[in-house]
Amino acid sequence: MNMDKGQGKWRPVDPMRHHRENGWDYKGRAIYHFTLPVEERYPLFGVLEGESAETAFVRLNPFGRRVCQMLCGLAQFYAGKDFALKALAQKVMPDHVHLVIQVLEPLPQSIGAVVRGFKSGCTKVYKEMYGSGENAAGVHGNGEGKAPVQFVRIFAGRGSIWQQDAAYYHERILHAPGQLRRMIDYVKDNPRRLWIKSHNPELFRLHRRTEAAGLSFTSMGNHFLLDWPDKQVVEMSRSAINEEVQERLRMVLAVAHNGTVTYTAAISKGEQIIARTLREQGYPLVEPTEQAFLDAGIQAAVEE
């Protein structure tokens, strides 16, 4: 069972519901990061442009601009429904949306009601702009103001623009010191990372034969982390108590903050907590799994 920290004590996390914490008060004060992917990760909102990673930006299409307006006005809209919210960061990417939002006062309903309301509003706007069936306006065109042919067919079968998911959205509660600042930077940095990924596919391809430390294995991710000069290995006994885990975690984070790549098998409870924290806070991590997946950064396989 993975564990995460919530409201002063460790709480079990439901791995099937994208970091949703069992027993967490989703009406209470907190800061959340939400990621909302489009069905089939279709680039429905716009395209990535720019001559370099530093100049990369998302050129939103008419629908993407409407979604951006709704996202920017979300806190104000719900203020009229007695929801005290503050948007700390937001970004509309071609195929997904990021939102970092703070709950300032206890809510009349779960924060999930806000996210689901936003998603429903976006789907309603899509229907208003493009229609809802195979014969929707613009089905034969793919330019500005017209629904793309491929997505019209996807939408006709789903009835929603959003990825079908039992949890409704990807969520992370921001607990750790410094985590909020790193998450805001992560959201703002999305176009640059997407530009790097799209222009350097070799960094993210499946490597059938990877060699490190005398071993040969299959890997996926930024395999150049294996050659990084500064490395630390995390191994902890299964019998380690929470105080020992927390002390080791503080030491690992301090070293990772200086650019060191962390290796861990994430087998024991302490190793799993440390690996999870490194992923959440965006530090480089090499973590063998059943497929020997190399995780190069925060939620790389989900959000980028």
Image: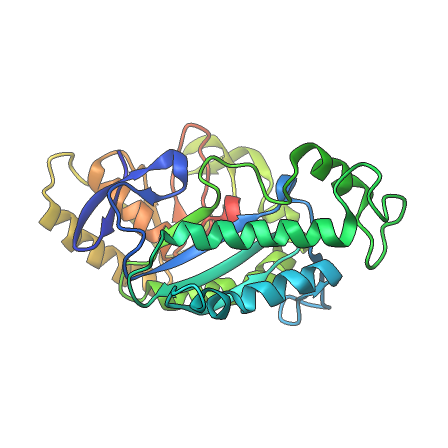
> Up-down: is 30 above or below 239?
below
Residue 76, compared with residue 43, is above or below; it is below
Question: Tell me, what colour scheme is on the image?
Answer: rainbow
Residue depicted at x 21% and y 58%: 251
Q: Position of residue 64 (x, y in %)?
A: 68, 60
Q: Position of residue 226 (x, y in %)?
A: 45, 47
Q: Is residue 269 left or right of residue 56?
A: left
Q: Residue 282's spot in the image, x, y percent?
A: 40, 57
Q: Going 34% across and 62% down the picture, which residue do you hit? A: 179
Q: Is residue 44 visible?
A: no
- Is 287 situated left or right of 220 in this image? left
Q: Residue at x 12, y 46 (%)?
A: 242
Give the percent coordinates (x, y) of residue 196.
62, 58
Q: How many marks?
A: 0
Q: Residue at x 46, y 64 (%)?
A: 78
For the residue pair 212 and 171, the one nearer the viewer reads as 171
Residue occupying the far front of the picture: 81
Q: Quadrant of residue 247?
A: bottom left
Q: Nearer the viewer, residue 212 or 4?
A: 4
Answer with the quarter of the image where residue 45 lies. Answer: bottom right
- Asked whether residue 129 is in view, the answer is yes
- In the rendered image, the vertical position of residue 221 relative to residue 200, given as above or below: above
Quadrant location, the N terminus: top left
- Drawn side of residue 123 relative to residue 268, left or right: right
Outermost residue toward the top?
A: 290
Q: Is residue 226 left or right of residue 195?
A: left
**Residue nearer the viewer, 80 or 264:** 80
